[in-house]
Amino acid sequence: YHLDESRLISGGLLAPLDQAVPISDEFRRIKRPLLDNVAKLSTSADDHMNIIMVASGMPGAGKTFCAVNLAASISLERELNVLLIDADVAKPHISRACGFEQRPGLIDVLEDDSLPIEDVLVRTDLNDIQILPAGRRHAQATELLASNRMEAVIDELAIRYPDRIIIVDSPPLLVTSEAQALANQVGQIALVVESGKSGQQDVLEVIEILDRRKPVNIILNKSVYSQSGGHYGGGYGYYGFNEDEQTGSE
């Protein structure tokens, strides 16, 4: 499926051409600790370490931009393929920007046990990334995302292809219950923090509701990185959690 990159740029999912190189460099740095987690922390396919949820506390932090660019960067790895899941089912930005609004997707697979996942995956010409659209809107989306069927779907996606990295664009964690349900299903979380906007209390509140046994990776987004005033990308921090202690490094 051909993706119109100009449409993705105008939709805020890819950086403008004059900022593409520095943004690409930023995401090369961002992806490495995430991929290291897959290689070093994964003890079995059941821990779903190859499934990375990209989330934010509140809307507007740029999580969808980070999810798409992270997927694009990881897809350049020679030994890996990438599946990008639009799980922000209330505001499916990826599905809309790609023209997938009318395609069946995640919600349809969750509601219909007989619908194979492979029937709704879309292989694109953006570095051969596959996309699972959000699917149709559903009043019980939260319950579907927290269901046994969702757990089975996640298991199938994580285990079927050991060389696949799955990026999940989730709803904001502090305003929807769907995101909290998703967080329980994935192996690691990339938390997008908006520079100058996301308060420390919001970040701490998000971390508090997450499973402290999962690695949580912080992406500082929308920080000014050049004199031209570009506001894509930024810095990166990693925070690993276990039951006894919290450690952080920059």
Image (cartoon, rainbow, N blue to C red):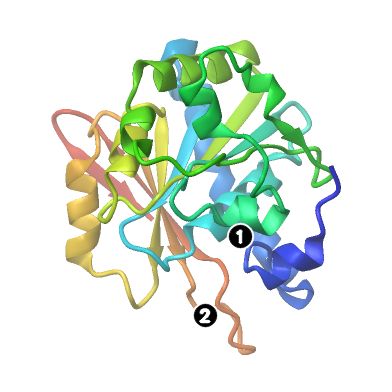
Picture coordinates of residue 149, whole percent (x, y): 42, 17
Which amino acid lies under the numbered mark 1 shown in the image of this protein?
Glu
Measured along the vertical axis of the image, is residue 177 above or below residue 109? below
Position in image of residue 211 (x %, y %): 24, 33
Image quarter (top left, top right, bottom left or bottom right) of the C terminus: bottom left
Q: Quadrant of residue 202?
A: bottom left
Q: Residues within 10 Å of mark 2 (few under 14, many from 20)?
A: some
Query: What residue appears at the point 47 percent right and 24 percent down from the top-left corner?
Result: 111
The answer to whether 21 appears left or right of 114 in the picture is: right
Please name the residue that numbered disc 2 is placed on.
Answer: 224
- Tell me if 152 is positioned left or right of 17 in this view: left
Q: State the residue in front, 54 or 153.
A: 153
Asked whether the residues under the numbered discs 2 and 1 touch, taking CB atoms below 8 Å apart as contact, a structural biologist would say no
The numbered mark at residue 26 is 1
Please name the amino acid that badge 2 sits on. Val
Badge number at residue 133: none
User: Residue at image x 31%, y 38%?
Assistant: 240
The mark nearer the N terminus, 2 or 1, is: 1
Q: Secondary structure at mark 2?
A: loop
